[in-house]
Image (tube, rainbow, N blue to C red):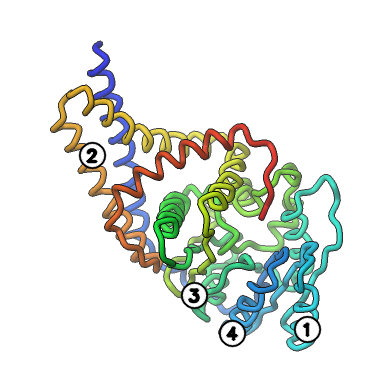
């Protein structure tokens, strides 16, 4: 078989795989209906913070403004050396809903973020726990009710969407695209019956599930994964719900430099090697087909092999991706400008390839 024919067949297979995934995601988001809200049960909000005084000044009022009838706000101060301690001390005295947990030191064998989450869960007074990060804010005062309302006798994990604040510049545009693209994968697969990860910026779980699983036992020393690894280990089609919509989303502060963003993504990707074999296989098929759907047509066009077919397949995939993003945005409440899709998708492939290779050889990362 000539090399050109081989490349063309490989490219065609990659595009078909991408189309299968995209159609699966489109159907999953299109069929999404909000969970039938159960009676408003009390809920604990859990936030872990390390030197996040300024962000907490914005987040705590936004949490206390939630319309949910009964809740508490637990802030775990993880060895901060700014004014976090004094801020939380004042807030907890002002409002009985605010409960502060202070950490001065952690055990050597436990990742700092996981230790903070564990102490926060233990301090929770209610069974249902909604987690977010210190640099996030709920998009509406209905966020807590929407997330908590998805719990029922079967649901133990609730996955939500968290976007990033829109700012000027291409980096911000790319960060928002990458976040949306990742969400389409983990929320789309969860809606299809295969939950494999969640993000701690908008995630909920039952305290009983966490305690029965002995928390992060078995991977407590791994940096990161307090959100996605826990979901990967314990989420099933029968115990996991997805909540979408603008009222149920949170918005985070994005990184402002490529270096900081790459470091953040490196940490996230480095956790992926601890996913289940099934998760890694599915994600590898999707990611490799995505990369090949961009790299192979470049080679084919340079070789002059069936250019009309190659360009046609590129356009078909782009159209389906475009439609998938439109549907996902509509359901999630995200407002994203799709004019730069081709450029974003191309850069994403280069970035993901570089970050993925780097993550394989990175042994030590920090959680912030």
Q: Secondary structure at mark 3?
A: loop
- Between disc 3 and disc 1, the foreground one is 1
Give above or below for 33 relative to 11: below
Q: Nearer the viewer, residue 62 or 81?
A: 81
Image position, residue 262 (x, y; %): 54, 47
For marks 1 and 4, give the CA distance.
Answer: 17 Å
The answer to whether one can see residue 45 in this image is yes
Residue drawn at point x = 49 percent, y = 78 percent:
140
Question: Which mark, residue 139?
Answer: 3
**Labels 3 & 2 near each other (Cβ < 8 A):** no
Image position, residue 315 (x, y; %): 20, 43
Q: Secondary structure at mark 1?
A: helix
Q: Secondary structure at mark 2?
A: helix
**Labels 4 & 2 near each other (Cβ < 8 A):** no
| Residue position for label 2 | 314
Give above or below for 232 relative to 4: below
| Residue position for label 4 | 65
**Which image quarter: residue 325?**
bottom left
For marks 2 and 1, give the CA distance.
Answer: 57 Å
Ranked by sequence position, the earlier of labels 3 and 2 is 3
Residue drawn at point x = 70 percent, y = 78 percent:
72
Circle 1: is it few (<14), some (14-19), or many (20+) Cα within 10 Å? few
| Residue position for label 1 | 90
Q: Nearer the viewer, residue 308 or 161?
A: 308
Residue drawn at point x = 28 percent, y = 35 percent:
16
For marks 3 and 4, give the CA distance.
Answer: 11 Å
């Amino acid at each position: 078989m000539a090399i050109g024919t081989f490349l063309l067949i490989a490219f065609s297979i990659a595009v078909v795989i991408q189309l299968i995934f995209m159609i699966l995601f489109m159907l999953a988001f299109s069929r999404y209906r909000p969970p039938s809200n159960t009676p408003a049960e009390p809920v604990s909000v859990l936030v872990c913070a390390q030197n996040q005084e300024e962000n907490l000044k914005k987040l705590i009022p936004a949490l206390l403004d939630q319309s949910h009838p009964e809740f508490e706000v637990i802030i775990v101060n993880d060895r901060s050396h700014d004014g976090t301690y004094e801020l939380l001390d004042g807030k907890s005295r002002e409002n009985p809903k605010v409960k502060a947990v202070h950490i001065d030191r952690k055990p050597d064998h436990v990742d700092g973020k996981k230790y903070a989450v564990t102490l926060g869960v233990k301090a929770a007074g209610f069974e249902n726990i909604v987690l977010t990060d210190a640099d996030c804010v709920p998009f509406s005062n209905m966020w807590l009710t929407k997330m908590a309302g998805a719990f029922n006798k079967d649901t133990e994990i609730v996955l939500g969407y968290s976007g990033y604040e829109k700012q000027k510049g291409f980096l911000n545009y790319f960060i928002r695209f990458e976040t949306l693209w990742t969400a389409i994968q983990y929320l789309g697969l969860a809606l299809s019956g295969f939950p494999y990860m969640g993000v701690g910026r908008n995630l909920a779980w039952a305290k009983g599930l966490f305690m029965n699983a002995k928390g992060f036992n078995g991977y407590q020393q791994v940096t990161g994964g307090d959100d996605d690894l826990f979901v990967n280990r314990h989420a099933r089609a029968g115990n996991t719900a997805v909540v979408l919509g603008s009222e149920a989303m949170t918005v985070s502060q994005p990184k402002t430099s490529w270096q900081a963003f790459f470091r953040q993504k490196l940490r996230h990707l480095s956790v992926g090697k601890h996913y289940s074999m099934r998760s890694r296989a599915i994600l590898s098929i999707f990611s490799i087909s995505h990369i090949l759907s961009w790299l192979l047509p470049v080679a084919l066009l340079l070789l002059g092999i069936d250019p009309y077919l190659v360009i046609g397949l590129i356009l078909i995939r782009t159209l389906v991706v475009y439609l998938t993003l439109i549907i996902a945005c509509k359901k999630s409440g995200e407002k994203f400008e799709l004019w730069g899709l081709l450029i974003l998708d191309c850069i994403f492939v280069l970035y993901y390839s570089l970050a993925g290779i780097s993550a394989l050889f990175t042994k030590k990362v920090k959680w912030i």
